[in-house]
Amino acid sequence: MLKLQELTPAELTIQEKESILNHAIDLHLIGSDEVDDPGFDIVEKGSPRAVHILRLVNINQHVGIMYILQREAENHFEMTILVHKEFRGKHLTADAVDALEQFMSRTHKSPVYLCASVREHNPLRHELTAFLLRHGYTYSSEEQAFIKQVV
């Protein structure tokens, strides 16, 4: 069973920092539409937009990291889930989304909306889109993201 452990930036392991930094670098190298990616700040000193940094733990193993950012709209949060390479392909992302939805419903006032961006340049955009749709997310052109009310 996947569990989430809330962390501060100082508690991140080297592997978790590398996952966040590699994600930020990948976004930068492939020409992300984001002007400033919070990944660099999260690792260095924390980001004011990062509401939660959560370690993914499965059977006492650290299998990934996720961070949750505050979006401009009230009670709207953007999720970024990074599963470590050696644990990919084991359906942990679905478990992570389920665990995150439960976590957000416990820690935030209603209504809470989770969002996920799937960028055009992402080579897995079709798979990610299908995944989000299967999990009850719908595309919002206003948000330019997939969105789901979890509370």
Image (cartoon, grey):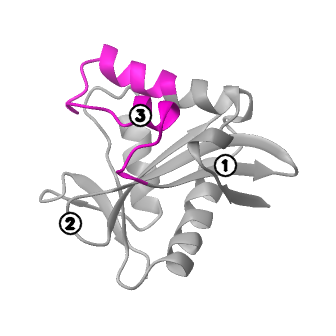
Q: CA distance from mark 1 to mark 2?
A: 25 Å
Q: Residue furthest bottom?
A: 110
Q: Which mark is residue 73?
A: 2
Q: Which mark is residue 142?
A: none
Q: Label 1, secondary structure: give it.
A: strand
Q: Report if residue 28 lies within the magenta region.
A: yes
Residue at image position (49%, 48%) is 67
x and y, in percent, of residue 137 in the image: 37, 64
Q: Amino acid at mark 2?
A: Ala
With respect to residue 98, does 37 lie above or below? above
Q: Which mark is residue 41?
A: 3
x and y, in percent, of residue 15 in the image: 68, 27
Q: Quadrant of the N terminus?
A: bottom right
Q: Nearer the viewer, residue 56 or 118?
A: 56
Q: Quadrant of the C terminus?
A: bottom left
Q: Amino acid at mark 1?
A: Arg
Q: Is residue 71 left or right of residue 51?
A: left
Per the image, the residue denoted by label 1 is: 55
Q: CA distance from mark 3 to mark 1?
A: 17 Å
Which circle's residue, 1 or 2, is located before the other in the chain?
1
Q: CA distance from mark 3 to mark 2?
A: 22 Å
- Magenta span of residues: 21-50
